[in-house]
Image (cartoon, rainbow, N blue to C red):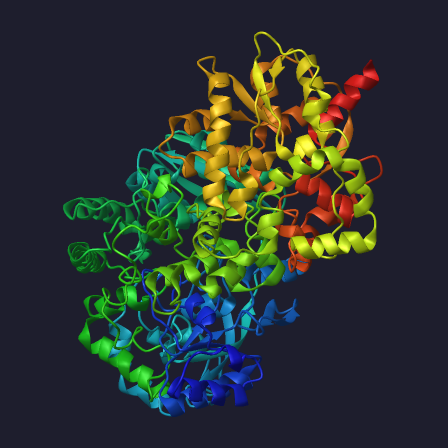
């Protein structure tokens, strides 16, 4: 590791000393530093290095070294904090690498002992067999860690039933700034507190009893010193929760577990606006619901598709029961009690997941206004007494208007806690001044309603400066004294909570270029600005989910490696730092960015699964284009990036080339020269291409559709094209073929050969545009990756060419074309279960609803896997990608195929997916068109 470190002087000496005493990972490289400059907030602080400790001894060793050098230390879990408290200028402690164990579970006492790096969903999955769970569940539950939840006193949607994190902590093991291990629990006798803490409480009894607002379930701001009062049992663990890494470092926690109801139902109540919803929320609490969540129509992009009832705002009120009918009955009671405009009660798991996903994705969706304008955190989670919430929201909306700002409130209405992202201009001095003015005015409004500046995510740098407005100068002074008892040297997360930095310092945007960067893609959703596209990542880190669902693709390389740099967020952070030029200093020539993007599969999963629509496949293509301008490229770029050219040359020699590929020495030589992984088998070329096979087919005089002869179908899977023509003919759909050579440019785009891609695309448009004409013909594309390239890459690389937009709009998948052109056609009944995978590009760009409906009509039962097959075009064939490619396939696809019963049809519309299954599972997968055509032929 030392060989890769570029720091000199004191930083290098600090690193050497850490390497000497730490058994975990010490990383002071530019990559490690760049990945941790930001969390999910507006703030950026550049660390000296990152340490992943293995245990409490490592933590103590780091603190000793950093104390010697006067270097700050900040603890970091999933990095999803939205107030800046997970960033720092010294050493970042990353607990997600090693200290992530579930130490023990005591089902009888309903407790578990965890290390700070345990992801919440991992804990909940582990204790589920005991009929238990951890109550607090923030929307980032799939990637946030218990240590981070303790640091911020996280809450989540079920806090009306099970409370905040502080309510669910029994004891903490904490290493103090002096290296002392403290045990914190309820009562002085059960705890080992820092010297002088008991006397501190005795001296300040009066202010601790009178200085905190009452009747406020979501008071997260400041230090919870009132938990140390004798009448409250002197709960040291509770007082530590929410201290944001400023007092000590949690190394172990004993948490309380709760017993969730066996069945749940969700009542969704529609109201005219969020104020009406907020006014109704307190009245529902007496029915003891599990949640009372609220959101307005501003955040809903697909209302009609998920069953939301009529209204401009909604309450999501969950109920539990011993059975589904009991849970539904309680949900129906809540719906009647809510005095709503309209209601819906849902109890089937799929329907509930679809509705909850809207609410959970709001943290990302809220970062864009409906018109695409950027919106930012900073006043993300103020809380007021629930009875005050309706009035507060009306005044809040008025305050936004007075500052000419917009925001979309949502959140935990039952607890009076509101999340909102606001369209602050954080790029100009005038916009930043307005950000400050609004922040000060809003703090006053919250306090006037008896509220807390933070109701869930902590104060961080975003709000701590304004704590005197809430608590007064005397109590805030006591906060500083409390901090000093724990951390006399002031090395633990300085600038946060006690003696905070200003809320308009360290903004992460101030280092970015002010002028647009010259790029190849059009970036239509970001005003043509690559910097704005990179800014799109706000750090909510949904891409860091360790285990995917059948509905998600993002992010296969992170799931395979567990490394931040191979997540969508990690890559976006490196691109941000590349543009900033402070940590990553080589611009487009950066090896740090190149190496992080190397394992990006260009699956496009983030384009749909990321709540803010980060499109890393496009960013990767852009980077490769810029990185290799005028330079020699990897062999795979020439071999696989220009695959259409090579296949045209090879087509007449298909049989001898296939024979040569079966000779191991010749195959090994070819793979070495082409940059192909030695573990791969070279695919066989079709002895007769698709176009050659149908050359004699008469062209229909008045076609309904144009069938796109993509490179993979034409040269490698001609049977798919023939099957598609057979099915379309049976459905009464006349299909024509282009008269000239066409190509979507996919392989050039994925390898960043964008100039060549544009040349290929323009030539394709010359052929296709006369065919499209004014007839409005659809273009049926059998290969999902080619369809996605035509739908997205084509118009984004040629934004000024209207022909590109016309062709993109005409693209249809096979099933979409059948559904549109032959809506009353009945496909042959196959009546067989299916297994396989929806192509990741289809999931991300095209959707698979038509495919699911066509399978259902044909009697093909069961669902297909999510995730990515791992081959992903050229990715899985490239040297050095074999292990990650296999790991991606093992995440969902291969287990599903292995577990399928005999007689199950293996479906995969993508050539890559079919190839991966053949090479890793020895199973032949088929395109849906092939399955239907075979059945038509068997019926005669």
Q: In which quadrant is the C terminus drawn?
A: top right
Q: Position of residue 201 (x, y in %)?
A: 32, 84
Q: Residue at x 47, y 29 (%)?
A: 808
Q: Indicate left or right for 136 with 481 as reference.
A: right
- Direction top: furthest residue: 701
Counting from the top left corner in percent of width and height, residue 209 is at 28, 75
Query: Who's the residue at 59% across and 35% down the image?
Result: 784
Residue 662 to residue 694: above or below: below
Instruction: Tell me which corner region of the image, top left, top right, bottom left or bottom right, holds residue 397.
Output: top left
Asked if 476 appears above or below 657 in the picture, the reply is: below
Image quarter hosting the N terminus = bottom right
Residue 326 seen in the figure? no
**Residue occupying image coordinates x 59% and y 49%:** 638
Report the side of 35 relative to 706 (left or right).
left
The mark tally for this picture is 0
Q: Is residue 680 visible?
A: yes
Return the residue nearer the eye: 96 or 373.
373
In this rendering, is residue 787 above or below 890? above
Image-based side of 291 in relation to 473, left or right: right
Picture coordinates of residue 608, whole percent (x, y):
49, 42
Q: Determine the residue positioned at 46% across, 66% down.
A: 149
Q: Position of residue 127 (x, y in %)?
A: 64, 62
């Amino acid at each position: 590791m030392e060989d890769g470190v570029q720091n000199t002087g004191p930083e290098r000496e600090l690193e050497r000393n850490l390497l000497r005493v730490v058994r975990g990972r010490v990383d002071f490289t530019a990559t490690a530093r760049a990945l941790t400059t930001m969390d999910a907030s507006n703030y950026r602080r550049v660390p000296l290095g990152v340490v992943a400790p293995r245990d409490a001894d490592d933590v103590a060793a780091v603190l000793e070294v950093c104390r010697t050098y006067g270097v700050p230390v900040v603890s970091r879990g999933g990095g999803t904090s939205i107030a800046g408290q997970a960033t720092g200028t010294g050493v970042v402690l990353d607990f997600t690498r090693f200290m992530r164990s579930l130490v023990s579970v005591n089902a009888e006492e309903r407790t578990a002992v965890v290390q700070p790096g345990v992801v919440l969903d991992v804990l909940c999955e582990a204790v589920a067999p005991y009929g238990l769970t951890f109550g607090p569940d923030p929307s980032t539950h799939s990637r946030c860690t218990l240590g981070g939840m303790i640091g911020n006193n996280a809450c989540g949607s079920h806090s009306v039933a099970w409370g905040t994190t502080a309510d669910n902590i029994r004891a903490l093991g904490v290493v103090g700034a002096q290296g002392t291990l403290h045990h914190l629990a309820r009562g002085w006798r059960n705890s080992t507190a820092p010297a002088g803490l008991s006397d501190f409480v005795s001296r300040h009894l009066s202010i601790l009893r009178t200085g905190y607002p009452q009747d406020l379930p979501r008071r997260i701001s400041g230090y919870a010193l009132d938990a140390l009062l004798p009448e409250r049992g002197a709960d040291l663990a509770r007082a530590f929760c929410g201290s944001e890494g400023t007092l000590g470092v949690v190394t172990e926690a004993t948490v309380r577990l709760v017993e969730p109801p066996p069945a749940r139902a969700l009542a969704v109540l529609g109201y005219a606006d969020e104020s009406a919803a907020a006014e109704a929320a307190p009245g529902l609490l007496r029915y003891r619901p599990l949640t009372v969540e609220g959101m307005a129509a501003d955040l809903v992009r697909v209302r009609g598709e998920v069953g939301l009832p009529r209204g401009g705002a909604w309450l999501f009120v969950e109920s539990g029961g011993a059975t589904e009918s009991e849970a539904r009955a309680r949900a129906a009671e809540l719906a009647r009690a809510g005095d709503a405009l309209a209601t819906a009660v849902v109890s089937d798991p799929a329907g509930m997941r679809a509705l909850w996903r809207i609410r959970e994705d709001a943290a990302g969706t809220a970062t864009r206004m409906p018109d695409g304008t950027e919106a930012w955190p900073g006043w993300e989670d103020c809380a007021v007494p629930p009875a005050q919430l309706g009035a507060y929201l009306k005044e809040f909306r008025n305050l936004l208007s007075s500052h000419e700002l917009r925001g979309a409130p949502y959140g935990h209405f039952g607890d009076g806690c509101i999340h909102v992202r606001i369209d602050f201009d954080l790029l100009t001095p005038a916009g930043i001044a307005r950000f400050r003015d609004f922040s000060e005015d809003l703090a006053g409004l919250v306090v006037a309603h008896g509220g807390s500046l933070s109701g869930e995510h902590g104060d961080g740098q975003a709000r701590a400066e304004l704590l005197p407005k809430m608590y007064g100068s005397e109590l805030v002074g006591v906060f500083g004294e409390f901090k000093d008892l724990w951390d006399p040297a002031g090395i633990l997360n300085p600038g946060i909570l006690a003696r905070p930095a200003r809320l308009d310092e360290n903004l992460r945007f101030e280092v970015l270029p002010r002028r647009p960067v010259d790029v190849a893609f059009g970036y239509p959703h970001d005003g043509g600005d690559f910097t704005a596209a990179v800014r799109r990542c706000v750090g909510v880190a949904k891409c860091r989910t360790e285990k995917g669902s059948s509905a998600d693709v993002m992010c296969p390389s992170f799931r395979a490696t567990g490394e931040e740099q191979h997540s969508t967020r990690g890559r976006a952070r490196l691109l941000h730092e590349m543009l900033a030029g402070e940590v990553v200093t080589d611009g487009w020539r950066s090896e740090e960015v190149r190496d992080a993007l190397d394992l990006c599969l260009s699956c496009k999963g983030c384009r749909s699964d990321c709540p803010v629509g980060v499109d890393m496949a496009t960013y990767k293509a852009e980077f490769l284009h810029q990185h290799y301008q005028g330079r020699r490229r990897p062999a795979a770029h020439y071999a696989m990036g220009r695959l259409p050219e090579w296949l045209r040359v090879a087509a007449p020699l298909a049989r001898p080339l296939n024979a040569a590929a079966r000779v191991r020495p010749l195959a090994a030589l070819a793979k070495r020269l082409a940059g192909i992984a030695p573990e791969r088998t070279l695919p066989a070329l079709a002895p007769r291409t698709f176009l050659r096979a149908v050359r004699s087919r008469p062209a229909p005089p008045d076609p309904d559709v144009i069938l796109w002869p993509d490179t993979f179908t034409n040269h490698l899977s001609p049977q798919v094209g023939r099957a598609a023509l057979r099915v379309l003919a049976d459905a009464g759909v006349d299909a024509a073929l282009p008269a000239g050579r066409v190509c979507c440019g996919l392989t050039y785009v994925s390898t960043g050969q964008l100039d060549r891609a544009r040349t290929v695309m323009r030539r394709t448009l010359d052929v296709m545009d006369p065919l499209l004409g004014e007839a409005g013909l659809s273009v049926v594309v059998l290969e999902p990756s080619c369809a996605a390239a035509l739908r997205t890459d084509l118009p984004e690389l040629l934004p000024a060419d209207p022909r590109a937009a016309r062709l993109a709009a005409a693209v249809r998948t096979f099933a979409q074309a059948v559904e549109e052109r032959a809506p009353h056609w009945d496909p042959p009944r196959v009546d067989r279960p299916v297994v396989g995978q929806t192509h990741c590009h289809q999931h991300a760009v095209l959707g698979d609803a038509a495919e699911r409906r066509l399978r259902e009509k044909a009697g093909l039962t069961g669902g297909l896997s999510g995730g990515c097959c791992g081959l992903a075009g050229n990715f899985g064939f490239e040297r050095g990608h074999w292990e990650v490619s296999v790991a991606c396939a093992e995440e969902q696809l291969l287990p599903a195929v292995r577990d399928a019963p005999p007689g199950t049809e293996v479906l995969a519309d993508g050539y890559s997916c079919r190839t991966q299954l053949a090479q890793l599972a020895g199973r032949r997968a088929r395109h849906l068109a092939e399955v239907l055509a075979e059945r038509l032929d068997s019926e005669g």
